[in-house]
Image (cartoon, rainbow, N blue to C red):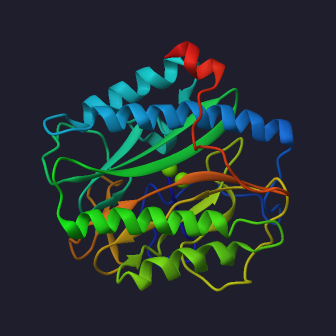
Amino acid sequence: MPRSSRRSRRPPRRAAQPPAPVAGRGPVPKTRDELDAMAAAGDVLAACLEMLAEEAREGVSTLELDAAAEEFIRARGGVPSFKGYHGFPGSICPSVNEQVVHAIPGPYRLRSGDILSIDAGVTLVGWVADSARTLPIGAVTAEAARLIMVTEAALERGIAACRLGARVGDIGHAVQAEVEAAGFSVVRSLVGHGVGRSMHEEPQVPNFGQAGSGPALEEGVVVAIEPMVNAGGHEVVMAPDGWTISTKDGSLSAHSEHTVAVTAAGPRVLTLGRRTPAAAAAS
Ligand code: MG
Ligand code: MG
């Protein structure tokens, strides 16, 4: 789940108010053991998103997907991090087509040709993992398929930039370059974020910016990198429900996210998923 950027002149109302970070505290690096604990949460989340990718097809409602996600996460000892977050009613944010992020699960039934972004978080033993992916439902247009592909490529570029000694601006710069080279735009008013004990920690991780700028990426820093990519312009609007963010021009939007740790061995993606004994035993 992205947070709203303080750079935004008109921040979204409710989603705009994650807990204020302690001034001057900066990113809190995690130890190796803590990263392993976060990866355990990430494994549950990856498996959950894999399950949802199987379930998400024409005729299925986003509310049904939400229920399946909550059951899946709780059955593995986790808590859906989004549920109740600033009053958010769901366990996932299922954002369809022109919806960018933060959509509320509901009665809408998926149709062939839709693109569905599923954003979810898992808290396991007090550690949070945050991840999202965008799925084509049935047969989608070539443009929609390209949008998803570019969003995933931008995430990969952002992850590759997440290296010891680099800066947060290097991530945004890499994401923006990939997206804009494809003729799409990155959302400005919502950003990725540090993650750990809380879903939203320092630093903010914009999907745009200048290489070499921003906070240094030190060993053990964990960030949720999450390109939100619009086929049209970058402007977004909030629905009257106080949550759902959509493109202002009605163009399609895709979202892809991983929780990534900076390590001496390179970026460690904590939400990639692997068959751990715990996950395997529970499935
Ligand atoms: Mg997320
Ligand atoms: Mg996030």
253 in relation to 32, above or below: below
Residue at the location (58% across, 77% down)?
174
> Considering depth in this image, is 2 or 221 the residue closer to the camera?
221
In the figure, 92 relative to 25: above or below? above
x 35%, y 84%: residue: 183
Relative to 201, residue 165 above or below: below
Residue 186 percent location from the top left of the image: 43, 75
Q: Count every numbered label the image shows and give the total.
A: 0
Q: Relative to 107, is 123 on the left or the right?
A: right
On the question of residue 81 being in view, the answer is no
Q: Is residue 75 visible?
A: yes
Residue in view at x 46 percent, y 69 percent: 11
Q: State the image coordinates of residue 75 (x, y, percent, origin top left).
A: 50, 16
Q: Residue furthest top?
A: 281
Judge by depth and name the residue closer to the eye, 75 or 57: 57
Measured from the top left, where is residue 137 in percent x and y?
Answer: 21, 47
Please name the residue shown 58% across and 22% down the image: 279
> Position of 243 compared to 194: left or right?
left
Q: Position of residue 131 (x, y in %)?
A: 52, 47
